[in-house]
Image (cartoon, rainbow, N blue to C red):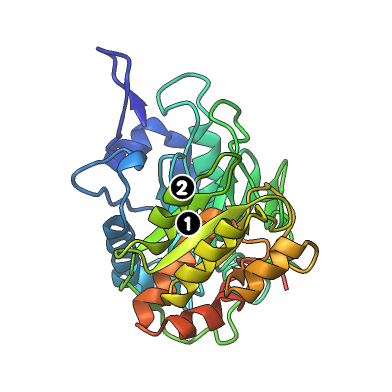
Amino acid sequence: MKQDPQDMTLKPFDFHQILDEVPELKKFALRIDSYTFDPLIDSSDVEPSFWQSLASLIQERYDEYDGFVVLHGTDTMAYSASALSFMLENLAKPVVFTGSQLPIGVPRTDGKENLISAVEIASAKDPEGHPRVPEVSIFFNSKLLRGNRSIKVSSEDFSAFKSPNCPPLAEAGISIKYNDSVIRRPLDWDEHLRISTNLDTRVSILKVHPGITPQVMKYFLCGPDIRAAIIETYGSGNAPSRQWFLDIVKEASGMGKVLMNVTQCLSGTVNMDIYATGKALEKAGVVSGADITTESALAKLFYLMGKTTDNESVKSKLGDNLQGEISL
């Protein structure tokens, strides 16, 4: 984003001017090209069609570059990074999302440092000449986080993102220290990139809360246009024990809906064996999301449902660690 000098509002920024705004990039011995989507949009307007366009663009230019940096608004960055982590199959190059809390052009902007470090990471090689971080990530305030493990935690601090259940992939100080034991690497560096752009977005998100009513639950779980639902539960996967609550879950499951249990907590995991209600949810057909984020759960469901019409097949794969999105 960049601040409009006339009305002082934040508006999307045409990054064809990026070398003028961040001249430090010229000091890298790199070829740096930019592509700006038309029309420019605020990140709050991001839709799956944007992810499809972005994945297609990366595939088209994949052989031309060592890595990719995606400049993206912070509001939906974790959603986009999560989606791309699934859509870019056999990825063997860095795709680093970054942005800023203070817009480019403001004297104290964090955007310059974030962008410069993201470019350095995207171009970094290991001793064998392979990309150092060949996965989708988010770089923000000196930390490189796995994209599908990241959540936005602040609208004001420079540390806008955290990855509570996964250590940073790298940390930038005087030098950039890479956490090689955490970074995912492809089994075959020469396997061609594939993209999966067929996404089924018929997913609802139900946040369990005191005072929730049967009518609200039915709307989110049993609606005719809903194929899957993420149920955000308390703590380690707990939910109300009232019979009507469990009856509606059973009704939705009986209709063939894919139901996924994701904790409302920032850190920790779902364990449906701890509480009686958790066990009842599991018995009713709810699948544990383990320690997945809601953003990543949404993207994973979009991706898996786009590959098949068989909901049982989708359920069977929700517990698989496809792209480092859960801890096993």
Residue contact at pointers 2 and 1, CB within 8 angstroms: yes
Q: Is residue 125 visible?
A: yes
| Residue on which the image places disc 2 | 77
Q: Is residue 67 visible?
A: no
Quarter of the image where the C terminus is located: bottom right
Q: Residue at x 32, y 60 (%)?
A: 54
| Residue on which the image places disc 1 | 81
User: What is the crowding at mark 2: few (fewer than 14 residues within 10 Å), some, or many (at least 20)?
Assistant: many
Give left or right: position of 59 versus 239.
left
- Residue 301 at x, y = what percent? 45, 68
Kind of residue at disc 2: Met
Query: Residue 201, labelled with which disc?
Result: none
Q: Residue at x 69, y 54 (%)?
A: 170
Q: Which of the 4 image quarters holds residue 322?
A: bottom right
Give the Cα distance between marks 2 and 1: 6 Å
Extreme residue in the left direction: 39
- Residue 53 at x, y = what percent? 27, 61
Label 2: state its secondary structure.
Answer: helix
User: What is the crowding at mark 1: few (fewer than 14 residues within 10 Å), some, or many (at least 20)?
Assistant: many
- Residue 17 at x, y = what percent? 30, 36
Give left or right: position of 168 versus 212.
right
Q: Nearer the viewer, residue 176 or 23?
A: 176
Label 1: state its secondary structure.
Answer: helix
Q: Nearer the viewer, residue 78 or 212?
A: 212
Extreme residue in the front direction: 243
